[in-house]
Structures are given as structure tokens and as C-alpha cells.
Image (spheres, rainbow, N blue to C red):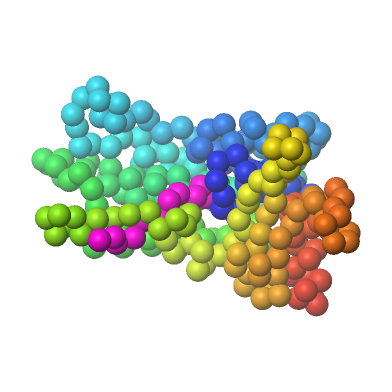
Amino acid sequence: IEGADKTGKSTLALSAVDEGPVLYLEQDIGGFDRAAIRFTEQIKQGLIMSRKYPVAIQRSSLGLEKSLLVQGYKEQWASIIGDYLDAIDNKLVSPSGQPFKTVIMDGGRLWSGCHHGYLQEIQEATPDKSKAKLIEIMYTEPNSRMYSLLDVAKQSDKHLILSHHLDDEYIEGSPDVNGRPVKVKSGKLVAKGWKHLSNLSDMTIRTELEIFRVGGKILYTLPMATVTMCGLTLDLLGYTFSYKQEIKPHVYEYSEAMAPTWTNIMKMAELMRGAPLP
């Protein structure tokens, strides 16, 4: 699930609780608490559980010291992946006592923790600790770890939902006066994080906000979700789920029937597929 900040990514992900208990492994601290207010009853019933994984503060990034060393990422990766595997193996269960059906993580921060954690391992094993970043050939190991993480979900009976923030896409622009290449914004937004993820996912959904105005004044906003990639059924590609439904030309009504929720999206996928989802 990809989208700009506060466009309903966590809310859409947590709506998967309709199919079974959800485990929210939170690295982007705050997203769960904002969305949880909509799921108070499910939380009381022990169907939703969250765990937080803040990374150690990098003093160099705050200008407090000059250092190329990273810290805390290796430990954060080990902690979050340990809980993920325990949930997959049903060693970690929901407060209701039922096994988790869905695990939610922040895909962008997950990738950051993965490759920064590997860099931390290299730095700790290098006497001069001088390596500031991974060179291209060193990404083989972090990539392998991410592939394995997805494979674990595919081989289980669980859903894995990864949320992604969107960021500006940069492309090669005209050289500067000295002939040096310059990166410029393309005007498009792309998901931050692991570049291979969209090709390996069963479905990619982009969240946005619909803004309703009267006389230039904003009355309210509602989330909407568009399927931008779907390996389950191609017929769902480009389909938008929204509370606002056009009942006749230029006449709209508010409807829960096509709201951007897990249940509605999966029902539509099965309808268009003409068969139950695997």
C-alpha cells in the first residue's frame, strides 16, 4: 500500500482484521496510533496488536558529532524479523489467543533497517570502521534478506502488507553550466524503499484523499484507493475504491459498499477473478 503521508495507508491495512487477527510491527512511529481510533472494538477484543521498533538516534545526523558509524539498525532488524517469524510460525499469537492472519510493516523503513543493519555488521567487523555506505556489490546480501522475508510469507497462510511512503521521482535533467549532470523532479511520485518490491507483490494499491469543496471551502476529506498492480486478476487493475459513488451523471452519494477496505477489495478481486483467491 503506497501513498503520501496521512492518506489512509494504515487504516486500509488494519481493515484486514475483518479476515482475522492483525499484527502491526511499527517502525514509522505514530501511524498505528492515528489509525487505531477506528478499530477500538477490535483492539479490545484482542484482534489487533502492535509492537514498536524505534531505531537508536544517530547523533551524527543531529550534528552532535562527526561519525560515519551507524548504530541500532542491526538490533532493530533482528527484533522485528524475530517477531515476524514467530507470528508466521504461530509462536506469537494475538491477545485473543488466535493466530495472526495478517502482518503489517512499513516497507520503506524495513528496507532502510535491512541495508543499514548490514552496513553496521560490516563496520563492526572492520578494524578502521571507515565504510560510510554500501557500494553496489554489497547490496547482494540485503537484497537476499528481503527476498527471504517475502518468501516466508508466500509459503505460509498469512498475509503480509507493506506500507510505503511516496517521494518525488528524480530524473536526469540538462547539465549545469560546467557540464555536470543534474537531477530534476519528474513530477511523479514513487514509493520509497526496496526497488524490487512492486514486482514481487500480489497487489499494489495507492491511497489518496478526495477533497470535497463548496464555494472553495473544504467541507471534508475521504480516503480513496486505486489498484495500480494486480497479479490476482488483471481486471482489477486501475479500479478505484471510494466512499463517493456516482449514481447518475454528476450526482453522487456516500456509500460504504465501495469504501477502500480490505474486505471490499478482496471481494471485488474474487468477483472479477471468477474464483476464490489462493
Please tell me which residue is depicted at 74% across the width and 37% down the height of the picture: 215
Residue at 49% in and 50% down: 166
Image quadrant where one finds the C terminus: bottom right
Residue 92 lies in what quarter of the image?
top right
Q: Is residue 129 magenta?
A: no
Q: Quadrant of the N terminus?
A: bottom right
Whether residue 126 is situated above or below residue 227 in the rendered picture: above
Q: Is residue 127 left or right of residue 230?
A: left
Identify which residue is drawn at 45% across, 56% down: 187
Instruction: Look at 85% across and 61% down and name the residue there.
Output: 249
In the displayed orientation, state which residue is furthest to the front: 215
Horizontal arrangement in the rendering, residue 221 relative to residue 151 (left or right)? right
Q: Quadrant of residue 169?
A: bottom left
Q: Say whether residue 20 is visible.
A: no
Asked whether 277 or 183 is in front, the reply is 183
The secondary structure that dominates the magenta segment is: strand
Query: In the rendered view, would you say 149 is above or below 66?
Result: below
Q: Position of residue 263 (x, y in %)?
A: 78, 56
Residue 7: where, in percent of width, then height?
Answer: 62, 43
Does the magenta segment cover residue 164?
yes
Instruction: Give the camera-side residue of 28 and 130.
Output: 28
* Residues drawn in magenta: 162-174
The percent coordinates of residue 167 (x first, y second) are 45, 49
Residue 171 in view of the camera: yes
In this rendering, position of residue 72 left or right of residue 90:
left
- Residue 12, image x and y in percent? 69, 48
